[in-house]
Image (tube, helix red, strand yellow):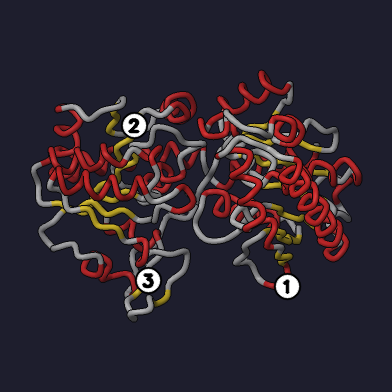
């Protein structure tokens, strides 16, 4: 490691939450693994945390679900009407959060901040503003890790917070180095703000292939209600509109095979209307769609009824096919996961896949906005012919090992820290 960091090895990760299996939490864990292997100590500041208490600083107001933070969000992005009272609330929350950032850095003697998406998407305006002011006041070395920008989501483009967005999402400040997860984000960031960034894609541990299912996970199919003679089609995402789950339902309908569509996650932070629509659509298409969010979590355990809870990685090995028909993704973790577990996958040609991932040579069943007869034929052949599946998945695994492994992340992080 560069000499300037020889005695400065205390890193503070900051976000709205480090909890569960969302993309930001998962990627943060990978960064932390690399840094800890290099001798760094990692600490966490957020509004929801599942990290050990001795390295955690919990502040409820850092979460986008905090009631006062939600009020500011609704006024600025839902109602698009900012009153003096709502501006005062933003300032008051900003002061509170900034005070705790000072305490966090002092308590753990932090040398370097790594901000995960909190300076990228304005779900928590006061947290972003507080971070920008804190970095400017202290000059602390900071890496801003951007996963998805506000301009990538229609909902944020009409608002009553342009002053704050211009200031802090993201801030163009000398102590901050910016990291994006794809080349399109790099281009847009430069065009819109003049900020230059380092591209570090999301990764997985391709050096260590997944072990076969253990005894605990051996009964996943039975637990999720999949019969022995049924295909298990897995949609490993939340139930939100941009995931394009209608395409997965249509595919299962057109396959004309005994199959169930299993959806792993709940609707989450974006309301439940889309989930209701998907349930109605499944019924109309006569497709058995199984919502199993109550049985899948970031760690094993038991439900209130005493049923087993599995991790998503317990479930992947049992799937016959993965559907990932998203219209928009910051990167596409589910694609990498499908490759890691050597599963064939359906992809909607979302822009980042088309620009960054597909050109590497990956093989997938691709759709461009709708399912065709050829799509159905290709999926059928993959389900019926193990040798075709193996050829596709082995090719994908080799390519991913080259471009999206932990070794790639380690190399890029070392270079960034040297800078």
Q: Quadrant of residue 415?
A: top right
Residue 54 is tagged as 1
Image position, residue 271 (x, y; %): 43, 49
- Looking at the image, residue 171 sits to the left or right of residue 398; the answer is right
Q: Are dots 2 and 3 in contact, CB under 8 Å?
A: no
Gap between marks 2 and 3 measured at Cα: 30 Å
Q: Residue furthest bottom?
A: 306
Q: Residue lying furthest top in this view?
A: 191
Relative to residue 397, is residue 8 depicted above or below? below
Residue 395: tell me if it is visible. Answer: no
The quarter of the rendered structure image containing the C terminus is: top right
**Numbered circle sitting on residue 309:** 3
Q: Of marks 3 and 1, which one's residue comes earlier in the chain?
A: 1
Q: Secondary structure at mark 2?
A: strand
Q: Is residue 122 left or right of residue 78?
A: right
Q: CA distance from mark 3 to mark 1?
A: 27 Å
User: Looking at the image, which residue is at 38% across and 44% down?
Assistant: 339
Q: Earlier in the sequence, mark 2 or mark 1?
A: 1
Residue 177 visible: yes
Task: For marks 2 and 1, give the CA distance.
Answer: 43 Å
The residue at which mark 2 appears reads as 348
């Amino acid at each position: 490691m560069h000499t300037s960091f020889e005695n400065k090895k205390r890193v503070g990760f900051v976000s709205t939450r480090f909890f569960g299996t969302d993309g930001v939490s998962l990627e943060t864990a990978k960064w932390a693994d690399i840094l800890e292997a290099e001798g760094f100590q990692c600490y966490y500041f957020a509004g929801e945390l599942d990290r050990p208490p001795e390295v955690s600083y919990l502040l409820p107001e850092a979460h986008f679900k905090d009631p006062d933070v939600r009020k500011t969000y609704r006024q600025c992005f839902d109602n698009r009407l900012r009153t003096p009272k709502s501006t005062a609330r933003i300032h008051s929350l900003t002061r509170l959060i900034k005070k705790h950032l000072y305490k966090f850095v002092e308590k753990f003697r932090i040398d370097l901040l790594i901000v995960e998406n909190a300076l990228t998407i304005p779900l928590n305006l006061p947290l972003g503003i507080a971070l920008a002011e804190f970095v400017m006041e202290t000059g602390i070395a900071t890496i801003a890790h951007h996963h998805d920008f506000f301009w990538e989501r229609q909902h944020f483009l009409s608002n009553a917070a342009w002053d704050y967005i211009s200031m802090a999402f993201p801030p163009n400040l000398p102590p901050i180095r910016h990291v994006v997860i794809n080349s399109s984000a790099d281009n847009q960031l430069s065009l819109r703000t003049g900020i230059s960034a380092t591209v570090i894609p999301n990764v997985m541990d391709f050096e260590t292939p997944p072990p076969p299912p253990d005894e605990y996970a051996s009964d996943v199919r039975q637990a999720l209600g999949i019969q022995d003679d049924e295909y298990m089609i897995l949609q490993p995402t939340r139930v939100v509109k941009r995931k394009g789950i209608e395409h997965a339902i249509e595919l299962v309908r057109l396959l004309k095979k005994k199959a169930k569509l299993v959806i792993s996650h709940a609707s989450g932070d974006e309301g439940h209307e889309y989930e209701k629509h998907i349930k109605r659509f499944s019924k109309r298409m006569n497709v058995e769609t199984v919502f199993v969010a109550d049985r899948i979590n970031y760690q094993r355990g038991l439900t209130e009824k005493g049923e087993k809870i599995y991790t998503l990685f317990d479930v992947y090995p049992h799937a016959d096919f993965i559907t990932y028909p998203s219209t928009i993704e910051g990167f596409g973790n589910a694609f990498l996961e499908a490759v890691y577990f050597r599963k064939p996958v359906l992809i909607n040609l979302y822009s980042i896949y088309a620009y960054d991932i597909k050109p590497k040579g990956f093989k997938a069943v691709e759709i461009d906005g709708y399912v065709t007869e050829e799509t159905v034929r290709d999926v059928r052949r993959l389900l019926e012919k193990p040798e075709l599946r193996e050829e596709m998945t082995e090719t994908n695994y080799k390519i991913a090992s080259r471009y999206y492994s932990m070794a790639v992340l380690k190399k890029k992080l070392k270079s960034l820290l040297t800078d």
